Image (spheres, rainbow, N blue to C red):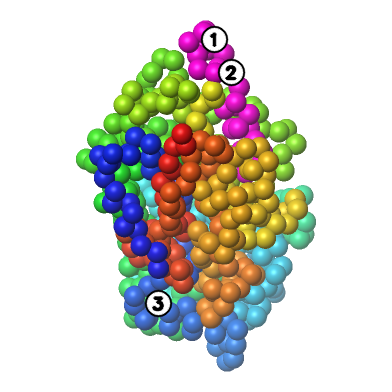
């Protein structure tokens, strides 16, 4: 456990003009499935459910009943009738396929563990479309175990009535479909798209022809099996565990995120870099009684509303001027133009944000005119875009500013401070995964350094999470007992504050996975009180003379 007491240093201390307190935090996009990753939970019922579900998947024994015993003939006939009534094509062929290929399968060994169903995307594709729908009518949740659906489902029959009503008698206008005007609302069943054999070669021509009703039937089987299993393994308990997780990780996520940002542990921070922020968080920050008063909330001119993952910068109003005509404004587009065309991964909308600010006179360094280039970045899963993006930001920072070409322009480049979720890993795999040591070596080569030093310790992780068995991709699941040691566990040194060598020394750097300025090393996160799967990293940078 590392104490966060150093954060309490007052901004009025004598050397505060030479100290820049910086933090970076990937606040993490909302995960629609509260069970997808192991979390730290105070209720023993959570650990029992996770362990029992895993044990059942490993050895179901006599519990490995057929799909037809979960989705009985009466339910399936009701499903067929609904699909016919809604004009879905291929229903008769789907019914034949069901009775021949789906109904006789064992729910675990023949369905949940079947790799062909996964390769054909017969469950994952419709789940992606209908799990959580951000619609003009509001946020709509499919009745399933693996999302934030609130109503209890104590039996398969009670679940089925809710599921059928949602799929066939609920109108939805997905916000992502509103291009060039409002789209007409449709029943949820009509949101599914065909699965094309050209994109997913495991799908046969006959399956492609009936892929919409086949997806609907397979998703019904998948959801029904999960409802059956959780009620078998944790009757009367699982729903309460889920509701508490939903409140902490979804419903109260924004409030808790704001509480942490505004907490005494971070009150003296001059700059906060934020990644994967929902667009709505901008207005929440601006209207927050403390944060809105303390910080300029800077964000991309074009917020990404589709993926809803944006990089932001908060900088102290007391310390920085964001409207100085000599050095201001967003430069993201210019920086993106410097990213190598042959980079192994691209920069998705919202992932990079670069902005120019100037220190106020009481803090200003005359050599560089108090100019700063602040950048916030969220890298791709394997970190392959990180080095090309860092190179682009560095190149941009070193260029003379063409907008102020006069004798008063400082010759020294602006100070670069760059907060990022670099998605760097413990080990490097060329062209596959960006290792943290190789990343640090590259930074040193171009005159930059991470807050973790020239030779960072790969064991100093800023993420610690692993997939459970209660999610659609069982091939990625980690055993409960192995969640700290499995190679599939995301336990990596991913988050960094980067700056130019010779501009700052690091006085102290710390991680936080509690929201209280402390880090508990053996704790997976998020937790019920820490809503992100990334630690918050904070550093005190002392200006070099």
Q: CA distance from mark 3 to mark 2?
A: 57 Å
Q: Which one is earlier in the sequence, the residue at label 1 or at label 2?
A: 2
Mark toward the viewer: 3 or 2: 2
Residue 484 on the magenta segment:
no
Residue plotted at (56% across, 57% down) = 493
Q: Marks 1 and 3: which is nearer the front?
A: 1
Visible in this render: residue 369?
Answer: yes
Determine which residue is flagged by label 2: 400
The residue lying toward the viewer, choosing from 495 and 312, is 495
For residue 46, the mark is 3
Residue 399 inside the magenta-drawn segment: yes
Q: Secondary structure at mark 1?
A: loop
Label 2 sits on a secondary structure element that is loop
Q: Which residue is mark 1?
A: 405
* Position of residue 369 in the picture relative to residue 390 (left or right): left
- Where residue 157 sits, quadrant-wise, is bottom left
Pointer 1 local density, CA inside 10 Å: few below 14, some 14–19, many at least 20: few
- The answer to whether the residue labelled 1 contacts the one labelled 2, judged by CB atoms less than 8 Å apart, is yes
| Identity of the residue drawn at 58% across and 60% down | 457
Q: Residue drawn 52% across and 12% down?
A: 403
């Amino acid at each position: 456990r590392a104490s966060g007491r150093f954060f309490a240093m007052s901004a009025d201390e004598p050397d505060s003009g030479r100290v820049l307190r910086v933090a970076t935090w990937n606040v993490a996009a909302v995960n629609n499935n509260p069970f997808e990753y192991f979390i730290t939970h105070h209720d023993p019922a959570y650990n029992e459910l996770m362990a029992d579900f895993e044990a059942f998947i490993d050895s179901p024994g006599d519990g490995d009943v057929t799909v037809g015993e979960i989705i009985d003939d009466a339910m399936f006939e009701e499903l067929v009738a609904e699909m016919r009534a809604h004009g879905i094509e291929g229903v008769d062929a789907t019914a034949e396929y069901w009775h021949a290929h789906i109904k006789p399968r064992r729910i675990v060994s023949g369905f949940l563990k079947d790799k062909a169903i996964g390769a054909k995307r017969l469950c994952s594709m419709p789940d992606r479309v209908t799990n959580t729908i951000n619609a003009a009518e509001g946020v709509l949740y499919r009745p399933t175990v693996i999302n934030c659906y609130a109503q209890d489902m104590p039996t398969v029959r009670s679940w089925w009535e809710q599921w059928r009503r949602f799929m066939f008698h609920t109108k939805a206008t997905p916000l992502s479909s509103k291009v060039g005007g409002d789209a007409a609302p449709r029943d949820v069943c009509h949101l599914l798209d065909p699965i094309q054999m050209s994109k997913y070669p495991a799908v046969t021509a006959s399956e492609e022809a009936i892929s919409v009703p086949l997806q609907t039937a397979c998703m019904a089987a998948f959801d029904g099996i999960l409802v059956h299993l959780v009620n078998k393994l944790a009757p009367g308990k699982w729903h309460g565990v889920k509701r508490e997780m939903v409140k902490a990780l979804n419903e109260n996520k924004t409030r808790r995120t704001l509480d942490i940002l505004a907490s005494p542990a971070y009150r003296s921070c001059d700059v906060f870099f934020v990644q994967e922020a929902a667009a709505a968080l901008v207005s929440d920050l601006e209207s927050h009684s403390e944060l809105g008063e303390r910080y300029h909330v800077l964000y991309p001119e074009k917020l990404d509303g589709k993926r809803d993952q944006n990089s932001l910068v908060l900088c102290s109003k007391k310390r920085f001027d964001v409207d100085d005509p000599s050095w201001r404004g967003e430069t993201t587009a210019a920086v993106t133009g410097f990213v190598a065309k042959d980079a192994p991964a691209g920069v998705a909308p919202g992932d990079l944000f670069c902005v120019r600010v100037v220190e106020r006179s009481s803090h200003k360094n005359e050599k560089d005119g108090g100019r700063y280039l602040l950048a916030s970045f969220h890298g791709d899963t394997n970190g392959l875009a990180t080095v090309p993006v860092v190179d682009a930001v560095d190149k941009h920072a070193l260029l003379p500013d063409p907008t102020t070409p006069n004798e008063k322009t400082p010759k020294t480049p602006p100070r670069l401070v760059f907060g990022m979720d670099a998605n760097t890993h413990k080990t490097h795999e060329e062209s596959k995964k960006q290792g943290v040591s190789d990343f640090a070596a590259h930074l040193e080569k171009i005159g930059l350094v991470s807050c973790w030093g020239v030779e960072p310790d790969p064991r100093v992780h800023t993420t610690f999470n692993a997939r459970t068995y209660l999610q659609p991709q069982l091939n990625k699941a980690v055993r409960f007992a192995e969640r700290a040691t499995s190679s599939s566990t995301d336990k990596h040194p991913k988050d960094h504050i980067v700056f130019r060598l010779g501009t700052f020394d690091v006085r102290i750097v710390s991680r936080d996975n509690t929201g209280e300025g402390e880090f508990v090393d053996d704790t997976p996160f998020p937790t019920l009180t820490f809503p992100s799967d990334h630690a918050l990293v904070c550093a005190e940078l002392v200006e070099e003379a």
